[in-house]
């Protein structure tokens, strides 16, 4: 006979109502952790899709995912000629708004060279970009169909291939076009004044050919760190290994998200703890006479403590399971990608259990102070 | 007298507070209760009846004196036994003015829980609970929740609970206060039956003159001191 459960079923309505509220809170916590995981997967997705070992970027910067990085397009040829390089490709990244089917869509436009590092990862449908102009490979997240046309800037592109699950760290779907198209798009979309400046400097240097980074693949056995160190000696260039690049991204994009989500998560968990604490406390106050009677009859303190702690734990377990089920069933409907990892759920479960133990403290304290003699009064 | 008293109270005093606010609730009370007897405690409100019952029930620590329960010296200027709850659980049954059944357990569970606390298996405890309900004539109400029981039924379940661990001592504080005279008489007859059959000592605090004839002795408390025995059967202690 479990007294905790008997008491719960005697006051089932209030208990379940509390569990419902709590399960929503815990569901939100799980969803936020899932969104954070999704963010990590997504933001690294674009960096990993390039298949780079080394990123050559503008000197003094940490690359296009952290800040503005611009370097002349012909740097690619110089890098490709270096000892140890298997292949190198210039890439550009650009956030734009496109009009599509009467709606404004935000897109991350990646410009990459055909058959060079940085181009779109293998398509799941259609084919890679083969022609140097006006072809695009879009991610399914962009909502474009194979063969569909989309207007970017002043040009119209045909979707020849589709990738899956690729988004930028901001959550925008990715569309690949050739570097040359991307450079023109950049020029077309620049404000008029900047465009005039652009043309003048292009006239001076003879080119509008700039890239944001050069993606480098090395020959087998060449050490990426050593290679990157060698590149840094070229004053106007900087280089990051793929590991560096992922760390930079984690710092700049993910850290802020982690702090924000961490803050909200701890707030929600604190609120949950307070709710459990208050409900368990009121349940204990309501049972004052019953607890006094139990003590009077001769129930040891550990029975009384067990009664209260078990109720708090039951509340935590029921709410967690309900919350997890809710998110498990509904995570597909979130506007952002939600990645649910069992380890995260397990960790949250542990935290909830600890929170319930803490929360039961007030009730336990109250119960232990109840005088057995008070059972006799009235 | 061949038999040892189950309850031996010797010169017990109890005061609350200090200085000008000091209340002497008990002043040197001595009392023996023998197996199989039912004694009554009466006296005006505030005379110390509940205090005496709480001291005998090991719920309240006296200020001085000594006390022996079931032959064991449990108090002599201080508690001599650490595990007072264990003592209560095994040796003492409590019956309250308001039955004090646990509201979240049904009738038989209320009885069984006492037995389980004392170490019985749930199955054994259930059998014992139903036995007791049968003994007290309310086995058909065994699944009822306390809220569904009438005052008399609830009080009988409470008596059954007090009997669950075969206690040597049964303490009842105004058990019939909430009952009409017929129900009160039934409850008293049950306590007499239990005392006789289990050789227990039963101490009942009561104001209720209608049941005075159901006691072997009636002790009267006034300002914390016992007056000489009085009442219906006071002159001749009944021995079984
Ligand atoms: N916990 C306590 N603190 C202070 N005074 C108390 C306490 N319990 C009882 N008293 C006092 O002790 C006296 C006896 O009380 P009690 O035993 O409850 O009387 P009765 O049960 O005969 O009405 C009363 O004056 C009461 O106010
Ligand atoms: Mg009283």
Image: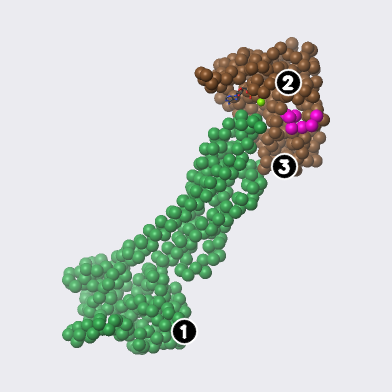
Chain colours: A green, B brown
Could you tell me which chain the residue with mark 2 belongs to? Answer: B
Tell me the residue at 41%/69% (across/down): A42
Mark number for residue B40? 2
Q: How far apart are marks 2 and 3 (CA)?
A: 29 Å
Q: In this view, does A178 lie above or below B191?
A: below
Q: How far apart are marks 2 and 1 (CA)?
A: 94 Å
Could you tell me which chain the residue with mark 3 belongs to? Answer: B
Q: Is residue A110 visible?
A: yes
The magenta stretch spans which residues?
B175-181
Residue B157: quarter of image: top right
Residue B190: quarter of image: top right
Foreground pick, B200 / B210:
B210
Tell me the residue at 58%/45% (across/down): A311
Q: Label 2 crowding class (10 Å Cα cut-off): few <14, some 14-19, many 20+?
A: many
Mark number for residue A101? 1
Q: Label 1 crowding class (10 Å Cα cut-off): few <14, some 14-19, many 20+?
A: few
Nearest-to-viewer mark from 3 and 1: 3
Mark 1 Cβ and ligand 1 under 8 Å apart? no
Q: Position of residue A79 (x, y in %)?
A: 23, 77
- The residue to which callout 3 is attached is B147
Foreground pick, B119 / B6:
B6
């Amino acid at each position: 006979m479990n007294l905790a459960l008997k008491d719960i079923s005697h006051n089932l309505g209030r208990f379940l109502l509390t569990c419902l509220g709590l399960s929503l809170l815990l569901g939100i916590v799980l969803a936020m952790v899932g969104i954070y995981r999704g963010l990590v997967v997504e933001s690294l997705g674009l960096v990993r899709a390039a298949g780079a070992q080394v990123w050559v970027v503008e000197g003094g910067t940490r690359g296009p995912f952290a800040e503005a990085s611009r370097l002349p397009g012909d740097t690619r040829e110089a890098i490709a000629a270096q000892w140890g390089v298997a292949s190198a490709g210039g890439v550009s990244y650009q956030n734009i708004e496109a009009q599509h089917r009467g709606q404004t869509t935000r897109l991350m436009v990646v410009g990459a060279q055909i058959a060079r590092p940085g181009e779109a990862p293998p398509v799941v449908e259609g084919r890679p970009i083969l022609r140097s102009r006006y072809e695009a490979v879009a991610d399914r997240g962009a909502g474009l169909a194979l063969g569909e046309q989309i207007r970017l800037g002043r040009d119209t592109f045909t979707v020849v291939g589709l990738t899956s699950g690729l988004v930028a760290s901001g959550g925008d779907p990715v569309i690949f076009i050739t570097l040359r198209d991307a450079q023109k798009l950049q020029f077309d979309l620049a404000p008029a004044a900047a465009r005039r400046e652009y043309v003048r400097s292009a006239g001076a240097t003879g080119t509008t050919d700039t890239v944001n980074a050069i993606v480098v693949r090395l020959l087998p056995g060449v050490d990426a760190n050593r290679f990157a160190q060698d590149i840094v000696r070229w004053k106007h260039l900087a280089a990051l290994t793929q590991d560096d690049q992922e760390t930079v991204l984690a710092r700049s994009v993910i850290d802020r998200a982690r702090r924000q989500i961490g803050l909200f998560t701890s707030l929600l968990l604190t609120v949950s703890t307070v709710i459990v604490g208050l409900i368990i406390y009121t349940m204990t106050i309501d049972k004052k006479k019953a607890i006094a009677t139990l003590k009077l009859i001769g129930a040891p303190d550990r029975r009384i403590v067990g009664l209260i702690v078990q109720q708090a734990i039951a509340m935590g377990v029921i709410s967690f399971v309900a919350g997890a089920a809710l998110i498990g069933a509904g995570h597909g409907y979130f506007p952002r990608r939600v990645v649910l990892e069992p380890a995260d759920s397990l960790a949250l479960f542990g935290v909830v259990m600890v929170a319930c133990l803490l929360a039961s403290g007030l009730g336990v304290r109250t119960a232990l102070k109840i005088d057995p003699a008070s059972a006799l009064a009235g | 007298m061949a038999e040892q008293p189950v309850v031996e109270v010797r010169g017990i005093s109890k005061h609350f507070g200090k200085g000008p606010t000091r209340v002497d609730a008990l002043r040197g009370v001595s009392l023996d209760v023998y197996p199989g007897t039912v004694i009554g405690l009466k006296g005006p409100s505030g005379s110390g009846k509940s205090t005496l019952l709480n001291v005998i029930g090991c719920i309240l620590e006296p200020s001085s004196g000594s006390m022996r329960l079931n032959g064991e010296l449990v108090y002599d200027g201080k508690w001599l036994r650490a595990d007072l709850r264990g003592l209560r659980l095994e040796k003492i049954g409590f019956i309250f003015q308001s039955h004090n059944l646990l509201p979240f357990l049904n009738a038989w569970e209320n009885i069984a829980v006492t037995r389980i606390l004392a170490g019985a298996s749930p199955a054994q405890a259930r059998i014992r609970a139903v036995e007791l309900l049968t003994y007290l004539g309310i086995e058909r109400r065994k699944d009822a929740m306390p809220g569904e029981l009438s005052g008399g039924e609830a009080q009988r379940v409470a008596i059954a609970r007090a009997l669950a661990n075969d206690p040597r001592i049964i303490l009842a504080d105004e058990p019939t206060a909430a009952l009409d005279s017929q129900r009160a008489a039934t409850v008293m007859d049950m306590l007499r039956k239990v005392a006789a059959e289990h050789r227990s000592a039963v101490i009942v605090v009561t104001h209720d003159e209608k049941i005075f004839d159901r006691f072997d002795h009636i002790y009267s408390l006034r300002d914390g001191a016992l007056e000489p025995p009085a009442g219906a059967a006071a002159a001749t202690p009944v021995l079984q």
